[in-house]
C-alpha cells in the first residue's frame, strides 16, 4: 500500500468532528441551560450518570483533538508504536490501535514539537484521573472543584483549537458552538468565583476574630503539636503579608497568621508541584514560593 493510499483513510474530518461532538455532548451533560454545573446548588456527592458521561465525553473529545494534531503532521502518528512498525502493519492490511494520552503527548513533543506547559499537563492529568475514577471506581468530588478543573480544561481546549489546529471558526459551526459555550461557562464561572471568594473571606474574618479571643489556647496547642510532630515547620508556613513563618496550616485555624502584629488570613490550596498548602483559593492552581523559586532557577 502506497503512502498516499495509507493516508487516504478518511480520518481527518472524523477525528476533528468527532472530537468537537464529544466535547459538546460532555458540556451538555455537565452544564444546564444557564451554564451552571448541574445540581450544583443542592447535590452533595457526584454519582449521577450526567457527571460520569460528561467527564468521559470531554476527555475523549480532547484526546481526539490531540490525535487530529498528530494526524496533520503525519497520519501514521495516531497509531501506537514507532513509525516503522506502524507502516509495516498498515502495509499488511492491519489497523493498529490508536494512541492513548501518554503516547499522544510524547509524540506531540517529538514530532510537531508541541509541548503543554507543566501547569497545563498537570490539569490534563487531573482530568484524566477524574475520568478514570468515574469509569472504574466509586467517586465523591466537590462540585466546585470539578467545575474549576473543567472550566480550565475547556479554556485549554479552546486555546488548542485556535493555536494548534487553526480552526476557522466562521467555517465550522461545531467549533463556533463550542467556543460560544466555553465562553458562557467561563463567564458564569467568574461570577461564581467572585461569590465563593466572598464567602471564603467572610469565614476567614470570623476565624481571625476567634483566634484573637483564644490566642493563648491556640498557641499552646500549636506548641504541643509541634513537639509531637518534630517541628513547627509542619504546622506553620510563611505569611504573604508579614513574611514570618507564622501562618497556620493545621486544623481549624489553617490559613490564619499567628503574628499579633499581622493577623491576616488566607484561603489555602495545594501546591501543584510539592502538594504542600500555600495561600490561594482551593480551586486555584498555584505553586508555593519554594517551588516557584525552583522553577525560576531552572
Image: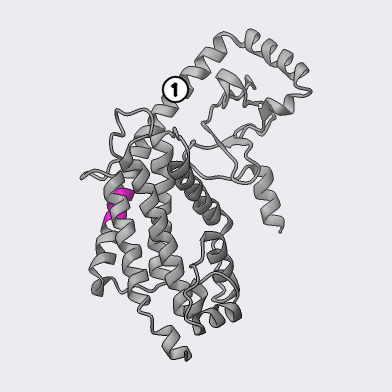
Q: Is residue 75 above or below residue 275?
A: below
Report if residue 244 lies within the magenta region: no
| Camera-nearest residue between 145 and 29 | 29
Write down the residue under mark 1. Answer: 203
User: Residue drawn at (39%, 50%), measured in percent from left and top?
Assistant: 56
The residue lying at 20 percent from left, 45 percent from top is 33
Q: Is residue 112 visible?
A: yes
Residue 220, by quadrant, is: top right
Which residue shows up at 44% across the image and 28% down it? 201
**Does residue 73 appear anywhere in the picture?**
no
Q: Which residues are magenta?
A: 181-186
Magenta residue check for 185:
yes
Number of residues whose C-alpha sits closer than 10 Å to that of mark 1, classed few (under 14), some (14–19) or many (20 or more): few
Pick the front one: 102 or 116: 102
Where is residue 20? Give x, y as percent: 32, 63
Residue 28, x across and y down, in percent: 26, 49
Magenta span dominant secondary structure = helix
| Residue 102 location, quadrant | bottom right
Q: Residue 265 is drawn in which quadrant?
A: top right
* In this rendering, position of residue 87 left or right of residue 295: left
Which element carries disc 1, helix, strand or loop?
A: helix
| Residue found 52% across the figure and 13% down from its top | 210
| Left or right: 177 as drawn, with respect to 284 | left
Residue 31 in the figure: left or right of residue 275: left
**14 or 293: which is nearer to us?**
14
Left or right of residue 195, residue 136 in this image: right
Amino acid at each position: 500500500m502506497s503512502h498516499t493510499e495509507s493516508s487516504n483513510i478518511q480520518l481527518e474530518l472524523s477525528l476533528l468532528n468527532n472530537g468537537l461532538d464529544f466535547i459538546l455532548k460532555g458540556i451538555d451533560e455537565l452544564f444546564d441551560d444557564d451554564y451552571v454545573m448541574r445540581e450544583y446548588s443542592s447535590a452533595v456527592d457526584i454519582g449521577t450518570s450526567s457527571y460520569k458521561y460528561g467527564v468521559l465525553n470531554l476527555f475523549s473529545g480532547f484526546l481526539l483533538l490531540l490525535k487530529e494534531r498528530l494526524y496533520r503532521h503525519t497520519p501514521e502518528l495516531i497509531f501506537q508504536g514507532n513509525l516503522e512498525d506502524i507502516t509495516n502493519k498498515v502495509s499488511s492490511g492491519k489497523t493498529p490501535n490508536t494512541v492513548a494520552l501518554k503516547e499522544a503527548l510524547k509524540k506531540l513533543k517529538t514530532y510537531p514539537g508541541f509541548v503543554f506547559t507543566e501547569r497545563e499537563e498537570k490539569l490534563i492529568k487531573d482530568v484524566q484521573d477524574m475520568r478514570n475514577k468515574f469509569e472504574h471506581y466509586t467517586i465523591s468530588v466537590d462540585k466546585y472543584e470539578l467545575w474549576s478543573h473543567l472550566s480550565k480544561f475547556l479554556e485549554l481546549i479552546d486555546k488548542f483549537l485556535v493555536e494548534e489546529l487553526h480552526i476557522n471558526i466562521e467555517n465550522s459551526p461545531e467549533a463556533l458552538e463550542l467556543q460560544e459555550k466555553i465562553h458562557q461557562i467561563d463567564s458564569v464561572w467568574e461570577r461564581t468565583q467572585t461569590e465563593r471568594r466572598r464567602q471564603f473571606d467572610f469565614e476567614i474574618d470570623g476565624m481571625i476574630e476567634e483566634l484573637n479571643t483564644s490566642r493563648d489556647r491556640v498557641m499552646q496547642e500549636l506548641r504541643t503539636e509541634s513537639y509531637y510532630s518534630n517541628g513547627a515547620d509542619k504546622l506553620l508556613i510563611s505569611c504573604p503579608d508579614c513574611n514570618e513563618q507564622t501562618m497556620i496550616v493545621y486544623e481549624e485555624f489553617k490559613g490564619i497568621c499567628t503574628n499579633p502584629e499581622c493577623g491576616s488570613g488566607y484561603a489555602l490550596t495545594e501546591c501543584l508541584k510539592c502538594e504542600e498548602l500555600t495561600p490561594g483559593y482551593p480551586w486555584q492552581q498555584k505553586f508555593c514560593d519554594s517551588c516557584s523559586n525552583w522553577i525560576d532557577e531552572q
